[in-house]
Amino acid sequence: MKYTTYALLAGTAAAKKNLKFIDPETPCRTNKGNHGPMNPGAPLEPIELPETHIWNNVDGVNYLTNLKNQHIPQYCGSCWAHAATSAVSDRIKIARKAQWPDINIAPQVLISCSGDDGCHGGEAYNAFEWMAKNEITDETCSIYRARGHDNGQECSQMTTCENCMPGEPCFAQDNYKVYGTELYGKVSGEEAMMQEIVQRGPIACGIAVPEDLETYNGGIYEDTTGDMEIVHDISIVGYGVEDGKKFWTVRNSWGTHFGEEGFVRVIRGTNNIAIESDCAWATPKDTWTEDKRHSLTEEERNDPRDEAKKAVKPAQPEGFMKRDGCRTEKAFFENGEKPLPVHAWEELGAEDVPANWDWRNVNGTNFLSWTKNQHIPIYCGSCWA
């Protein structure tokens, strides 16, 4: 087995518990002990901290990107990649002042291409370090497959960024946007973590997973078993106080059905579930201001690892996509339409409508969600959906 002694020891501890979302053989948070030197830059100067600071509501603005579920379309121990990319995506949004579009960094590139163990575990710090030395793409280039280099989705140019057309094999996309990290380091302890979160944004942390954490459905969580075996990575997006009890606001990667819409509040200041002992952070490189892109080399266009994918022509029924696009001419509603009592055009005259209106920027606020690519991992005429 190529997985580390740490993973085996943590796996032994996890195996003693009846966990649903953590593989007892190979927990999704591992520690190979192969860290390169940190690049933290100048230390933060401490500032006076507010009692509450959560990045989903800072002066009425949400700076968090979307929630994920690492376990679909199949189980994958990729919590480390989700924690790292979510934290970096949030920090990009913070740096861009929450303007459109949200940029969701692709965990798939990490589980296929970085040096950790893909769906068999890794560490967010390693992901931050890898992104400082390598370009990474967003999810319009590389959609999440829940498979890594260890179980069927090896690193290749098409894994990094691909596109597909009807009736043709998919191909490596040219001229795509790239991202990365600049500074990165480790942080631990309540005060240092709060300073990092308030001054620069969410961080990624390792935690233990007691059995009752998997069934958490609200409130401030506090483990009473003393479990300190780190087997999972999450991102901490803020902190607060409720009824005199301090807490961390934690984003998990188990879907919105978990906890408080995908989040869990964990008691703060006591290192419960080891949450204050092993965290990491990174600052994003500014690649968006000048729209930095990657142009394919001939070697990348002819990446031999993509030959099998390029040889596959998707099976499609006769006449597929022969109807002038993915939008049908008419739509029929079985029980009829359900119109508003009064239509907008009946309430406002042309003279009352502003000359310009863009939901991406209404008085400085973006109201749109993220951009998608309907054509990956295979072509689909799903523009309507």
Image (cartoon, helix red, strand yellow):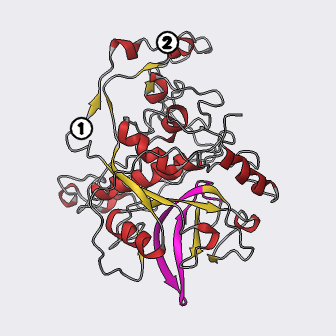
Q: Main secondary structure of the magenta part?
A: strand
Q: Which mark is residue 269?
A: none
Residue 243 falls within the magenta-colored stretch: yes
Relative side of 134 to 34, left or right: left
Using the image as rendered, state which of residue 170 and residue 197 is in the foreground: 197
Residues drawn in magenta: 233-257
Query: Is residue 143 visible from the viewing direction of this image?
Result: no
Q: Earlier in the sequence, mark 2 or mark 1?
A: 1
Is the residue 81 above or below the residue 330 in the image? below
Label 2 CA crowd tier, 10 Å (few <14, some 14–19, many 20+): few
Amino acid, disc 1: Asp
Seen from the viewer's position, the closer of residues 102 and 297 is 297
Q: Above or below — where is 189 with respect to 370?
A: below
Residue drawn at the location 58% of the way across and 15% of the way down:
314
Q: Inspect this view and state whether residue 305 appears.
A: yes
Residue matched to label 1? 291
Quadrant holding the N terminus: top right
Write the residue at 49% across / 23% down: 156
Q: Vertical placement of 154 versus 285: above or below?
A: above
Q: Quadrant of residue 152?
A: top right
Where residue 132 sits: x, y (%)?
A: 36, 42
Q: Residue 116: within the magenta?
A: no
Q: Secondary structure at mark 2?
A: helix
Name the residue that disc number 2 marks: 304
Tag 1: Cα neighbours inside 10 Å, few (<14), some, or many (≥20)? few
Q: Quadrant of residue 42?
A: bottom left
Q: Residue at x 26, y 42 (%)?
A: 287
Q: Secondary structure at mark 1?
A: loop
What's the residue type where badge 2 is placed?
Pro
Q: Position of residue 350 (x, y in %)?
A: 21, 54
- Residue at the image point whose x is 23% and y is 63% from the top: 363
